[in-house]
Image: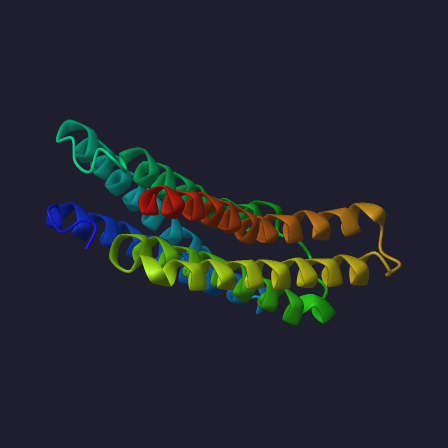
Amino acid sequence: MFLKKTRKLETQIDEYLDLVITGGLIFKLGIRCYLDNQIEAFEGHLKDLRKIEDSADDLRRNIEIKLYSRTLIPEARGDVLGLLESCDKVLNITEETLLEFSVEIPNLLPELKNDFNDIAESSIACLENTVSGIRAYFKNVDAVRDYVTKVQFYKKETNKIAERIKRTVFRTDHDLSFKIHIRYFTFHIERIAEESEDVCDRLSIAIIKRLE
């Protein structure tokens, strides 16, 4: 095990990744509630996601201080911090996206409801498999490739759904501003998958360095 001499650090990294997973699940619930016009429940999920994001930031900073002040795993410290920081960026996007829904209240067409649920599911599947890949980096390096492959698969699916949404809305008679607004929110959700893939690119490089 990569972190066998730093058990407490391993526990903290696991707790941090648990928060990222939880944030992704809350994001999906938030989108589902918004699409079902359950606005009070939606706002509750946004509030929960903000708390998760704050807790994750605090824990990540604590891990960072511990890695530097106690000179733990110096040979991989930069890679570990880079993975956690880039993963944190994905979690931030989930919170920012729900916040954008709360502020701008986009009017999503009923015929796009299933597509928006699907793109939320697919983008969070990217995030979940990214987290699993990072856990594998510490505990079972042979499994990392499988998770990276899954992230690449779900990222492509996310792109396909995003394209379908944009093709649908831009073939309606609505105003251009309405169409652009829908595209804007599609783009925000799609970013979760895009950034998750970027984390996996970093993860793949970290694995190569570990095996050299």
Q: What is the image's colouring?
A: rainbow
Task: Give how far across and how far down residue 141 sits, in percent.
Answer: 32, 57
The answer to which of 38 and 162 lies nearer the viewer is 162
180 on left or right of 123 = right
Image quarter hosting the C terminus: top left
211 on left or right of 69 = right
The answer to which of 79 and 115 lies nearer the viewer is 79
Image quarter hosting the N terminus: bottom left
15 on left or right of 88 = left
Image height check: is 167 above or below 67? below
- Residue at 71%, 69% in the rendered image: 110
- Residue at 17%, 52% in the rendered image: 11
Task: Give how far across and how far down residue 66 sits, in percent.
Answer: 17, 34
Task: Give how far across and how far down residue 154 sits, in percent.
Answer: 56, 63
Q: Is residue 144 visible?
A: yes
The answer to which of 177 and 149 lies nearer the viewer is 149
Residue found at the far front of this picture: 212
Residue found at the far top of this picture: 69
Task: Give how far across and how far down residue 43 sits, in percent.
Answer: 46, 55
- Residue at 69%, 57% in the rendered image: 107
Say how many tags the image has: 0
Image height check: is 23 above or below 110? above
172 on left or right of 96 = right
Image height check: is 30 above or below 75? below
The answer to which of 147 and 165 lies nearer the viewer is 147
- Residue at 33%, 50% in the rendered image: 52
Tell me the quarter of the picture where residue 63 sits.
top left
Q: Is residue 98 visible?
A: no
